[in-house]
Amino acid sequence: MSDASFEQASTAYWSALEAHASIEFFTSTSVDERRRVVNDMQRAYLALRTTEEGRLFVDSMTSDSRWRVAMQACMHALAWDSEPAKARLTAFIEQGNPYASIAGIYLEEYKRSDEFVRGLSWTPSS
């Protein structure tokens, strides 16, 4: 991945994570808008995961103070058996964090089946 490609993918991933974190569930945010954000995030993630630099960038997002940013990055980073992602998810669980149940599901599914990791490879629609 060239420097320009990395810059484009990392900026797109960060922007999509920010947008995803700001969407309030059960609000007037349109389904089309939510789909666009998730598709943008997936496209950027698929590009970033192909290089060490990209994987390190996603790993760095696992420590974000906003739980939705961190959880999404953790889920993606499990694809390469990321220690920072596993540690953050474990910390959510051990701290009795309100998001502990989601973190537990991610870790359990990851440990239980290769399907979890394969499921992270979906291609977004146009």
Image (cartoon, rainbow, N blue to C red):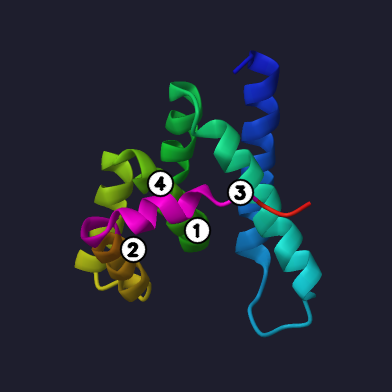
Left or right position of 121 against 36 = left
Q: Is residue 112 magenta?
A: yes
Lower sequence index among marks 3 and 4: 3
Asked whether the beta carbons under mark 3 and mark 1 sit within 8 Å of each other, the answer is no
For the residue carrying disc 2, how many other residues have a C-alpha within 10 Å: few (<14), some (14-19), or many (20+)? some
Name the residue rendered at 67%, 35% in the picture: 11
Residue 42, which numbered label?
Answer: 3
Asked whether the beta carbons under mark 3 and mark 2 sit within 8 Å of each other, the answer is no
Q: Circle 4 — which element? A: loop
Q: Disc 3 versus disc 2: distance between alpha carbons?
A: 17 Å
- Please, what is the three-letter code of the amino acid marked with disc 1? Arg
In this rendering, the answer to whether 124 lies above or below 21 is above
Residue 63, which numbered label?
Answer: 4
| Residue 24 on image: x %, y % | 66, 75
Question: Where's the N terminus, which quadrant?
Answer: top right
In magenta, the rendered stretch is: 110-123
Asked whether the beta carbons under mark 2 and mark 4 sit within 8 Å of each other, the answer is no
Lower sequence index among marks 3 and 2: 3
Image depth: mark 2 or mark 4 in front: 2
Q: Disc 3 versus disc 1: distance between alpha carbons?
A: 19 Å
Q: Which residue is mark 1?
A: 66
Inspect this view and state whether residue 65 appears: no
